[in-house]
């Protein structure tokens, strides 16, 4: 009876560990772009490449490697485009700040225009 | 009319120009950039088809070609790869992606074997290390073991004459 209980406990803890690993793989795979399928993450895709990548992540995490390490490894092989949120450096600065700069430029043009035309006048009804 | 009134028009024209450039430049899309270019070739710790020892060539210009017996374009490019090996005098290493040893061997027996050695990659590990996105894919590695070119899709006779042979000749004489 005691050995049965121990076996149950052991298998339960193993299952918890396994599902914990599943979750970590899933979470990491969500951040990664499946480079052969448009707009899908590695987590969502069943493409062979995505399955290979998931296997690599699972094996790496199970072997105790950090998520940053695995992420860096895939970037090294597939380029920054494999990340849905690319890191901030000189090459990706336009990506991060481009929209903001465009918005600011648009706002400036609008502001100057509005100031020149003065307060809104009511036209003839 | 003030010159600044033309600004929106100029901006719109610039945007159209940019988009047109992206649409018309097919070549730029066909060749995805590889982060491996200019970097040391990843190791290939894989089992060799029909033999032992997996040592990739060293101190010479060589070519890595990823293929599979189930891939039709790979069959089509085999004669071109044969030409490449004989014309440039390079060794081509075949990487048999997601295949069995039996099927890989039968494929090469039947359609001709341009490879100096063939490595088996049944789990796709080797291909993943090289950032391969599909078969066939071809890499040129220089004498110092640096990856110099990545070609996706089958190598055509035109690719051979215009891209691969000139580059390999240049690297061999460098």
Image (cartoon, coloured by chain):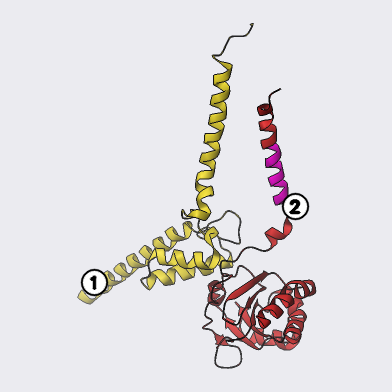
Chain colours: A yellow, B red
Residue A62, percent from left and from top: 38, 71
Residue A104, percent from left and from top: 52, 35
Q: In which quarter of the image is residue A6?
A: bottom left
Q: For marks 2 and 1, give the one nearer the viewer.
A: 2
Asked if the stretch drawn in magenta spans residue B18, the answer is: yes
Q: Is B1 situated left or right of A13 in this image? A: right
Dividing the image into 4 quarters, which one contains the N terminus of chain B? Answer: top right
The answer for how far apart the CA atoms under marks 2 and 1 are is 69 Å
Report the residue at 58% width, 10% height from top.
A121
Q: B149 and A24: which one is in front?
A: B149
Dividing the image into 4 quarters, which one contains the C terminus of chain B? Answer: bottom right
Q: Name the residue under label 1.
A: A5
Discs 2 and 1 share one subunit: no
Kindly state the secondary structure of the residue where label 1 is placed.
helix
Q: Is A113 situated left or right of B85 in this image? A: left
Q: Indicate which disc residue B24 carries.
A: 2
Report the residue at 51% width, 83% height from top.
B45
Report the residue at 58% width, 61% height from top.
A35
Count the marks: how many?
2
Name the chain under label 1. A
Name the chain under label 2. B
Question: In this rendering, is residue A97 above or below B42?
Answer: above
Q: B73 and B20: which one is in front?
A: B20
Q: In which quarter of the image is residue B67?
A: bottom right
Tag 2: Cα neighbours inside 10 Å, few (<14), some, or many (≥20)? few
Residue, far top: A124
Instruction: Give the magenta-colored segment's residue range.
Output: B12-23
Kindly state the secondary structure of the residue where label 2 is placed.
helix
Residue B102, percent from left and from top: 64, 87
Q: Indicate which disc residue A67 carries.
A: none
Residue B136, percent from left and from top: 67, 73
């Amino acid at each position: 009876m005691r050995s049965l209980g121990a076996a149950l406990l052991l298998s339960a803890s193993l299952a918890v560990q396994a599902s914990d690993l599943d979750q970590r793989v899933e979470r990491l795979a969500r951040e990664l772009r499946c480079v052969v399928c448009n707009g899908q993450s590695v987590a969502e895709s069943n493409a062979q490449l995505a399955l290979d990548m998931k296997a690599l992540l699972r094996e790496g995490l199970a072997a105790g490697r950090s998520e940053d390490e695995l992420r860096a490894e895939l970037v090294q092989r597939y380029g920054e485009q494999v990340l849905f949120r690319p890191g901030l450096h000189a090459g990706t600065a336009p990506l991060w700040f481009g929209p903001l700069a465009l918005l600011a430029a648009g706002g400036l043009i609008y502001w100057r225009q509005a100031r020149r035309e003065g307060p809104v006048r009511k036209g003839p009804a | 009319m003030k010159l600044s009134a033309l600004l929106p028009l100029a901006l719109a024209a610039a945007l159209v120009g940019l988009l047109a450039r992206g649409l018309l430049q097919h070549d730029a899309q066909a060749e995805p950039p590889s982060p491996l270019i200019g970097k040391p070739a990843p190791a290939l710790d894989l089992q060799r088809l029909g033999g032992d020892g997996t040592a990739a060539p060293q101190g010479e210009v060589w070519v890595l070609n990823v293929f599979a017996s189930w891939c039709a374009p790979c069959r089509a490019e085999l004669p071109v790869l044969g030409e490449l090996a004989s014309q440039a005098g390079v060794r081509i290493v075949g990487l048999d992606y997601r295949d069995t040893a039996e099927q890989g061997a039968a494929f090469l027996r039947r359609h001709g074997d341009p490879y100096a050695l063939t490595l088996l990659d049944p789990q796709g590990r080797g291909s993943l290390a090289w950032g391969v996105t599909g078969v066939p894919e071809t890499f040129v590695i220089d004498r110092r073991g640096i990856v110099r070119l990545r070609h996706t899709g089958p190598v055509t006779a035109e690719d051979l004459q215009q891209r691969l042979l000139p580059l390999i000749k240049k690297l061999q004489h460098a």
